[in-house]
Amino acid sequence: MPRPAQTVDLTRRKPRQVRALDTVEVILEATARILQQEGPAALNTNYIADRAGISVGTLYQYFSNKEAILVAMARREVATDEAAVIKAISEAAHGSDIDPVRLALRALINAFAKRRVARRVAFEALFGQGLGNELASSVRKVAQLVGERSDRLLPARTRPVTPTNLFIITRAISGIMRAASQEESPLLGTSEFEDELVHLVQAYFAGQ
Amino acid sequence: MPRPAQTVDLTRRKPRQVRALDTVEVILEATARILQQEGPAALNTNYIADRAGISVGTLYQYFSNKEAILVAMARREVATDEAAVIKAISEAAHGSDIDPVRLALRALINAFAKRRVARRVAFEALFGQGLGNELASSVRKVAQLVGERSDRLLPARTRPVTPTNLFIITRAISGIMRAASQEESPLLGTSEFEDELVHLVQAYFAGQ
DNA sequence: TCGATTATATGAGCAAAGCTCGTATTCTGT
DNA sequence: ACAGAATACGAGCTTTGCTCATATAATCGA
């Protein structure tokens, strides 16, 4: 039975009342918990509804399919991460002489340390739907902030930052992060890991 | 219905006769074709068997589950890629003054240009099973070859190459490649793309 | 050449999972 | 208080992963 290629259909009812927002919340929360506690294999929509304390029908009123739930989760994570990273950079804006690149990466590493499995599966869905470019605006914001603050810290910054550069470095970083968390690499907690990421970013932008 | 975490069970009959080898071949080929032509959503084991011209039962004699087929595919791709990269480096060994890093990356880019969807899904399965480290031996081989040949080309090579370095750079590269092919980035065919990858690798190893 | 053993192939069908749809309940504004 | 809209429900239809009892083909010793 051949099927058309998958795409997340987002044309579903959007929550307008408070309880509906709660429902969406509860669905995402249950999904994350199942992934984290029982693994991706245990994730099915009936079970999600069960654990969320709602009915399957309700679930499908806000999400057109299982994938859509994961994509929504991923989008949330992205938003949360962006906030965390920006906060980290901004807080240290006055006074701190730690490289903002390091601050940004440190915040990202922290973000990736939480709910690894859930995050991994969610991002897989996001990328799998060809939605990896949704990271772009977040990244641009962060990159700009870092750029502003790093003038005084990155001495040998010669090349101007192009969109291609942004593509390269963000995909590199997410590739590394993803692999590290996915493969349960013992590197993840270490300062060596942070150092190497910082080095990668700085070396890439510094040289010519 | 909670389930134990997924693992690829490989304890299945191994093909001993020629026709059995053919069968395995035909299964992998059909899988790749379906993924490529109709997308991941169209991939189901009944359909694979159908397109392969065999029965489902036969399929499950060589693969314990759907994931296992994809993992097998990914392993093949890794082997093929390794061969292509090594060939590229070796061929240019005598005489060529093109940076071996560039040669290796160029070969890899070519490899990633073929059957994008199938490759993506296959690698997702490999990584999803926590088998990302299977790339290690391939990478080590290539890295060693590159190292041998690049002494005369990479002047400022100061740091010794550690396992951590290898982890960082390989995951970075695969992250970029994956994203580029997945997001159908127009960068993929360009020389700028190759240049940037080369720059990333060289900058990472050269500096500090 | 022939029987016996082992390897390979088959496909109906079971169980689990994705998802729908007709119906019931709750909210919102007037 | 009432109409209409939004939300919730869950039995059950459909699809899909996978098994198992059975059939066919290759291999090999006698």
Image: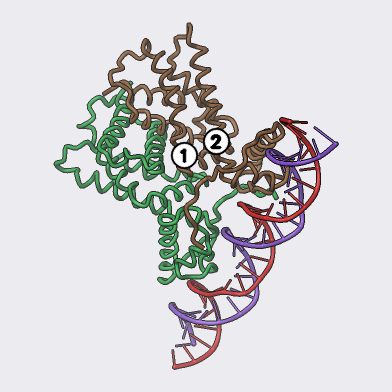
Chain colours: A brown, B green, C red, D purple
Relative side of A172 to A38, left or right: left
Q: Residue furthest top?
A: A95
Foreground disc of the pair 2, 1:
1
Residue located 43% across and 17% down the image = A145
Can the viewer see residue B100? Answer: yes
Tell me the number on the disc at residue A74: 2
In this orientation, which residue lies closer to the viewer: C5 or A88?
A88
Q: Nearer the viewer, residue B179 or B60?
A: B179
Q: Residue at x 37, y 28 (%)?
A: A166
Q: Residues within 10 Å of mark 2 (few under 14, many from 20)?
A: many
Name the subunit of mark 1: A
Dot 1 falls on a residue whose secondary structure is loop
**Disc 1: which residue:** A131
Q: Amino acid at mark 2?
A: Ala
* Front position in the image: B92 or B36: B36
Task: Judge by depth and name the residue closer to the eye, B81 or A88.
Answer: A88
- Quadrant position of the C terminus of chain A in the picture: top left
Residue type, label 1: Leu
Q: Is residue D1 above or below residue A147?
A: below
Residue drawn at point x = 55 percent, y = 41 percent: A121
Left or right: B61 in relation to A151: right
Against B71, residue B154 (above or below) is above
Question: Are the residues flagged by discs 2 and 1 in contact, CB closer than 8 Å?
Answer: yes
- Residue depicted at 42% across the width and 52% down the height: B118
In the rendered structure, which disc, 2 or 1, sits on the residue that comes first in sequence?
2
